[in-house]
Amino acid sequence: MPRYQQQDPAKLDAEQRRIWDACTAGPRGAVPPPVHVWLNSPGLADHAHQLGAHVRFGTPFTPKQTEIAILCTARYWTAQFEWAAHVRLGLLAGLTQEQIDAIAERKTPHFADPDDRLVYEFAHSYYQNHRVSDDVYERVRARWGDKGIVDLAGLIGYYSFVSVTLNVFEVPTPPGAKLLEK
């Protein structure tokens, strides 16, 4: 029996339906796969989808910078569904295929924009060391302030939660998606 089941909106109870409707009315305009899983625990789903909307759409980071952090997270966790979804979104946000391939291959991509490079350094260094150096921390804080450093830590933390959900529940990748090597 598969672990992942898409929710049928017609079979949701009132609390689940409220969360479903909030997701579709929000910036995503849809109910992404992790929320389908989380709806089995409506309290968790309610808070998680709101946090996700904030870290993806309500921070001082550009869509490109957000996708850099998400792709670093998906690579760290080898979260195949997340990777496939965010490769597409990363390209739409302005990442090059070369930059995405470098992240996939665990190589350092070239970023002409120093802010893009700084977001990459933060996410990459955290996943390498489970810490962020004082230098990187202070540069992120100097550039985006205390709110920015909290939002960036929250962004990679939230997408780690998403990655774990996707991996535990074996959410299938779209047909034809290029998979990450372990």
Image (cartoon, rainbow, N blue to C red):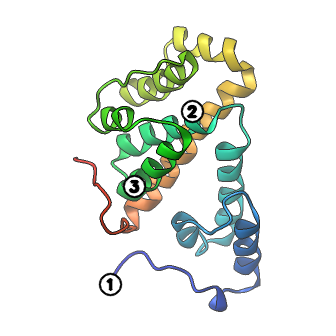
The image quadrant where one finds the N terminus is: bottom left
Residue at mark 3 to residue at mark 2: CA–CA distance: 17 Å
- Above or below 48: residue 158: above
Describe residue 85's horizontal placement relative to residue 181 as left or right. Answer: right
Q: Which residue is mark 3?
A: 84
Mark in front: 2 vs 1: 2
Instruction: Inspect the image, locate mark 1, and give the three-letter code of the amino acid beneath it.
Output: Met
* Label 2 crowd (10 A; few <14 / some 14-19 / many >=20): many
Which residue is found at the position 61% from the left and 32% from the top? 152
Residue 156, percent across and down?
Answer: 53, 38
Residue 31, percent across and down?
Answer: 61, 69
Residue 109 or 76: which is nearer the viewer? 109
Instruction: Inspect the image, locate mark 3, and give the three-letter code of the amino acid beneath it.
Output: Ala
Residue 137, percent across and down?
Answer: 58, 15
Residue 16's disc is none
Please report contact status of discs 2 and 1: CB closer than 8 Å, yes or no.
Answer: no
Residue 132, percent across and down?
Answer: 49, 20
Residue at mark 3 to residue at mark 1: CA–CA distance: 24 Å
Residue 65's disc is 2
Q: Which residue is mark 1?
A: 1
Which residue is found at the position 54% from the left and 19% from the top? 113
Residue 47 or 113: which is nearer the viewer? 113
Asked which quadrant contains residue 115, the reply is top right
Asked which quadrant contains residue 146, the reply is top right
Describe residue 168's horizontal placement relative to residue 138 as left or right. Answer: left
Mark 3 or 2, nearer chain start: 2
Asked which quadrant contains residue 102, the reply is top left
Instruction: Inspect the image, locate mark 2, and give the three-letter code of the amino acid beneath it.
Output: Gln
Q: Secondary structure at mark 1?
A: loop
Residue at mark 2 to residue at mark 1: CA–CA distance: 38 Å
Mark 2 or 1, nearer chain start: 1
